[in-house]
Image (spheres, rainbow, N blue to C red):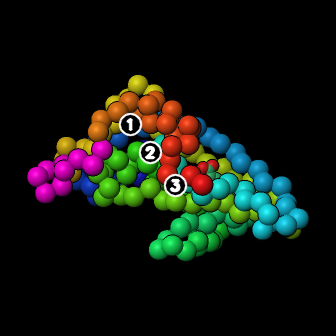
Amino acid sequence: MRILELIGEGLGLKEGYFEELSKRQALVVNHYPPCPDPSLDMGVPAHCDPNLITFLQQQVYGLQILKDGHWIGVPTLPHAFVVNIGYQLQILSNNKLVASEHRAITNSETGRTSIGTFVSPIGDCMVEPTKVLVNGGSPALYRAFKYQEFIDDYMAEKDPKRH
Ligand SMILES: O=C(O)CCC(=O)C(=O)O
Ligand SMILES: [Fe+2]
């Protein structure tokens, strides 16, 4: 996947580094019907995606990201994808890249459909901070784990950023 190759290049990783880590792609369609009082209901509560990277398409506004303690709306752009960094990219990069905390709000006028492509490793794949970015001055911030272990914890809501 070209975008992962470019991210890898930016991090100083060897070509093809992400190949094993991006074997799964899940297409998820979210539909949010109009909500008479959006202040009462969040489309998707605040979270970071557990996977490697997500490509999201939205035609109706609703996605917001948390930046410096403020929720910022992501404008809709025709033919554009929003790229969300997931936890695995944060871990592999030893926090050089940080998973984006985001949420989806509803609106009272129109329904909204978003389409996400979630790229992730398979369950048995081992994940750990890449050796290239770990050294004396920058020790590994995470232990090695199987991706499935991470997902099991995430689903059990041990993610501190899931409210
Ligand atoms: O619908 C959206 O804009 C966000 C959906 C989302 O964050 C997710 O499915 O992980
Ligand atoms: Fe998400």
> What stretch of residues is rendered in magenta?
134-142
Compared with 126, 65 (above or below) is below
Q: Is residue 52 visible?
A: yes
Q: Which residue is mark 2?
A: 52
Q: Which mark is residue 161?
A: 3
Residue 60 occupies quadrant: bottom right
State the residue at coordinates (13%, 50%).
135
Q: Are marks 1 and 2 in contact (CB under 8 Å)?
A: yes
Residue type indicated by callout 2: Leu
| Tag 1 residue | 21
Look at the image and say whether residue 136 sits in the magenta stretch. yes
- Where residue 54 appears, x then y in whole percent? 52, 50
Horizontal side of residue 46 vs 146, given as left or right: right
Kindly indicate the quadrant of the structure image that contains residue 145.
top left
Check if mark 3's residue and mark 2's residue have beta carbons within 8 Å.
no
Alpha-carbon neighbours of circle 2 within 10 Å: few (<14), some, or many (≥20)?
A: many
Farthest top residue in view? 124
